[in-house]
Image (cartoon, helix red, strand yellow):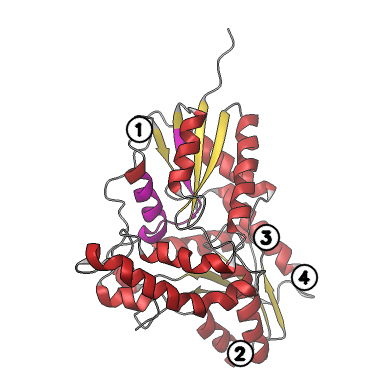
Amino acid sequence: MTRTARRVGIVLFQLGGPDTLEAIEPFLYNLFCDPDIIDFPFARIGRKPLAKLISTTRARKVQHHYATIGGGSPIRRHTERQARALETELRNQGFDAHCFVAMRYWHPFTREAIEQLRVAQCEEVALLPLYPQYSSTTTGSSLNEWRRLFPDDVPIHCVETFYRNTMYLDAVVEKVNEALSRFPEPERPEIVFSAHSIPMSVIDKGDPYQLQIEETVRLLTERGGWRNPHRLCYQSKVGASRWLQPSLHQTLRQLSAEQVREMCVVPVAFVSDHVETLGEINHEAREEARRLGITRFEMSAGLNDSAKFIQALGQIVHQALGAAVPTLIPMGSTGRTLAAPEYAAAAGLD
């Protein structure tokens, strides 16, 4: 008798991004309405009006970033391609796989993915946040939203990190080597690993993100075997509160002061090209580097739907599904709540 393939649903989580300039403000409104990330006294009364004020103000500040990359974020397109490629990869491994995309703050929302999942009538579900390292501000928030909306009695397997997966590391190394090959002397440029920054108040609460980022850089440099000098920095800080340092801007100035003239930026916390890679690094940082006298600037491309990365995701999901007992979403994986002053700082209003 032929064994029936396991009918499995795989949910790929991302924060999402506005796909048009008109979507920037509602995207930001959803972000600042997230009760798991941002909170303050009497939030039930004041959260929505304040989120409206902040999103309106902030939208004007970030619109130019999206305008420089074509008028919207490509993250949905990349994530849906990853989903389709992963579906094929898992079916080749013998699973009756069905992949769905769940964005935290823009379409397709988590509730939309759940509706599609229920229609597919999957026997078990694998949750795959596409953040290699864990933070309560990313993975934690996405999984909490899932738990709020999906009370169904279906076995759940959960992947919380995958930065140690060797095939994932090889996929990143491949992209770095491609970028380095564009230099006349590939061993000469400084490699600058850049990760999204988060407030130090989150780290002080025990968030493992910083340690996992630092470990990722160590694993990549060991696996890549590069002789290039390298350093780690953080990007995308907003507001005046303390965030992880040094910033990408500080690092550019430091490299210039040290007479470094060639650099290769490696986005180390993202798996898809979006506004923070295409706009903030490849446009804004590139221009700043030029003004500072850095003559050669390259950025390693996002993993997107590269064959090696899709194979890595297939391996990661396969391992999660192979567990004897489904991994439950820990009740302690709550989003970090920001106090009122940090709320204003994160919004850029302080």
**Local secondary structure at mark 3:** helix
N-terminal of the pair, mark 4 or mark 3, is 3
Q: Write the residue at 54% across / 61% down.
A: 270
Residue lying furthest left in this view? Answer: 42
Give SS at disc 1: loop
Query: Which range is magenta?
Result: 125-146
Indicate which disc residue 256 carries. 2
Give the mark toward the camera: 1 or 2: 1
- Secondary structure beneath disc 4? loop
Kind of residue indicated by mark 1: Asp
Residue for badge 1 = 152
Residue found at the very far right of the displayed protein: 184
Q: Position of residue 265 (x, y in %)?
A: 62, 72
Q: Is residue 151 magenta?
A: no
Please name the amino acid that badge 4 sits on.
Arg
Closer to the eye: label 4 or 1: 1
Tell me which residue sits at (68%, 57%) in the image: 174
Amino acid on which the number 2 mark rests in the picture: Ser
Q: Position of residue 108 (x, y in %)?
A: 51, 50
Q: Earlier in the sequence, mark 4 or mark 1?
A: 1
Q: Residues within 10 Å of mark 1 (few under 14, many from 20)?
A: few
The circle on residue 175 is 3
The residue drawn where x is 32% and y is 73% is 343
Q: From what the image shows, is residue 216 above or below residue 199?
A: above
319 over 310 or under it: above or below = above
User: Is residue 141 rendered magenta in the image?
Assistant: yes
Q: CA distance from mark 2 to mark 4?
A: 21 Å
Q: Which residue is mark 4?
A: 182
Q: Earlier in the sequence, mark 2 or mark 4?
A: 4
